[in-house]
Image (cartoon, helix red, strand yellow):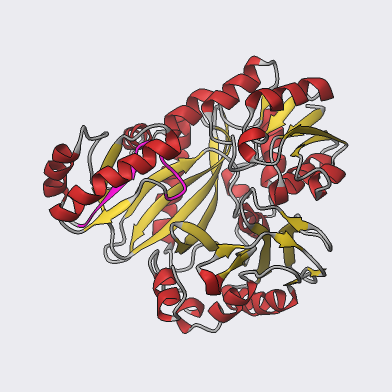
Amino acid sequence: MKRLLVANRGEIAVRIIRAARDLGIATVAVHSKADADALHTRLADAAVEIGPSPASKSYLVVDAILAAAKDSGADAVHPGYGFLSERAGFAAAVAGAGLTFVGPDASVIEKMGDKVAAREIARAAGVPTVPGTPGGVAGVDEALAAAEDVGYPVMLKAAAGGGGRGIRVVDDADALRTAFGQASQEAAKAFGDGTMYLERFVTHARHVEVQVLGDGSDAMHLLDRECSLQRRRQKMVEEAVAPGVSGDLRTRMTDASVALCREVGYRSAGTVEYLVDDDTGEFFFIEMNTRIQVEHPTTELVTGIDLVAEQLRIAAGEPLRFAQDDVVGRGHAIEFRVCAEDPANNFMPAPGDLGRVTLPAGPWVRCDTWAEPDGKVPPFYDSLLAKVIVWGADREEALRRSRRALAEFSVAGVPTTAGLFTELLDEEWFRAADFHTATLERWLADRGEST
């Protein structure tokens, strides 16, 4: 691998370019018209415009990205997260063009991207799954019959879904009848497939994920992360490692994750996601993300391992460089996703011109961002401005450092969610890690913020 095209934008494109440069790999940035002067285009060794500002006409156009790779002499493509990162067709097209795709094989992306197929693979690997239908249901009548067997409340989920779309939680048969068509239509619009399945809804659940690496023949884990603090099923705060997870539970989850990777011959970095039932101590497989995650820096800070660099090494054909016993977690890390959104106005995205930008720094503080003074927040893409990540010798120290880091973060010109996180640090339930997947939305509702 000598020349890497980064098929993404924003902070993750900047992150990948820096990792590649550390390894001596030249980089090519692609950009839409709106991103012509973005940070990632200036950090890369070369930049290629691939289309108009909307993502549907640029970052999601496979032919344009492949043409940019050919014209720039790239021999590999890193998809980042979002956009085309989990589309099996894109991975296959990259490989078909004679390029190295930095990620798992297209067949693995396809298998794990289908929620029903992924559950079947997880069961075959001995990984616990949430009680529910073994596959998609044919219609609302079949869903009603299955719900009677599983027991309410149940969650309707899109078989081809992700990102919180096509999901409904229902408490009884009447609600299921109403929600089924809505969820199926939403899934069909978002994913081109309206197939639904259902599973038991775990009322007091934590969302815990395990970071994995595989080289196609072997696999390993890099501990776990806490991702329960969500709004509309979008993560807002993440921690590594997950507080409140016992040593026994951690061992069972990490072992299960490695077994799943071996079952599919996984190659690259990935994440296996679980629901942990606080009432019973059980854990259940949700899905596998076959890409780098937004929250990967927390794992990097506690393990000292550069996950993007390992992705690149594995894609270039190198075997895993570490044994499982080499992975040791030290301290605690917390990530806050700071977005250009207005919490007082239903978290409305706030594109606009940036003025002064002050980013947190100092000991054990990391800020992954694309934002610069006098830059612009385009209206066409995700509203993520920056990820403020802190490390401490323990969680208490990490919380104290979080307060300092967030106080230093300042962006003029647009509202951000940084202040909301500062207020979150004052909450006893957050400091005590006494929360589950519904806690943040309830807190926002109690404050009068729309969720």
List x then y, in percent, for residue 429: 44, 79
Residue occupying image coordinates x 62% and y 67% = 331
Q: Residue at x 61, y 32 (%)?
A: 103
Q: Based on the picture, tell me whether residue 285 belongs to the magenta stretch.
A: no
Say whether residue 263 is visible. no
- Residue 442 visible in the shown view: yes
Q: Nearer the viewer, residue 218 or 91?
A: 91
Magenta span contains residue 158: yes
Q: Magenta residues?
A: 153-164
**How many labels were placed on the picture?**
0
277 or 426: nearer the eye?
426
Query: Which x, y percent locates residue 420?
Result: 58, 75
- Residue 369: which quarter of the image? bottom right
Q: Is residue 281 left or right of residue 96?
A: left
Examine the image and state in which quarter residue 374 appears.
Answer: bottom right
Quarter of the figure with residue 311: top right
User: In this picture, is 174 found above or below 345?
Assistant: above
Quadrant where the C terminus is found in the figure:
bottom left
218 or 8: nearer the eye? 8
Q: Would you place residue 64 above or below residue 147 in this image?
A: above
Residue 145, compared with residue 391, is above or below; it is above
Q: Position of residue 273 (x, y in %)?
A: 44, 49
- Quarter of the image for the N terminus: give it: top right
The x and y percentages for residue 143 are: 18, 41
59 on left or right of 183: right
Whether 240 is drawn above or below 24: the answer is: below
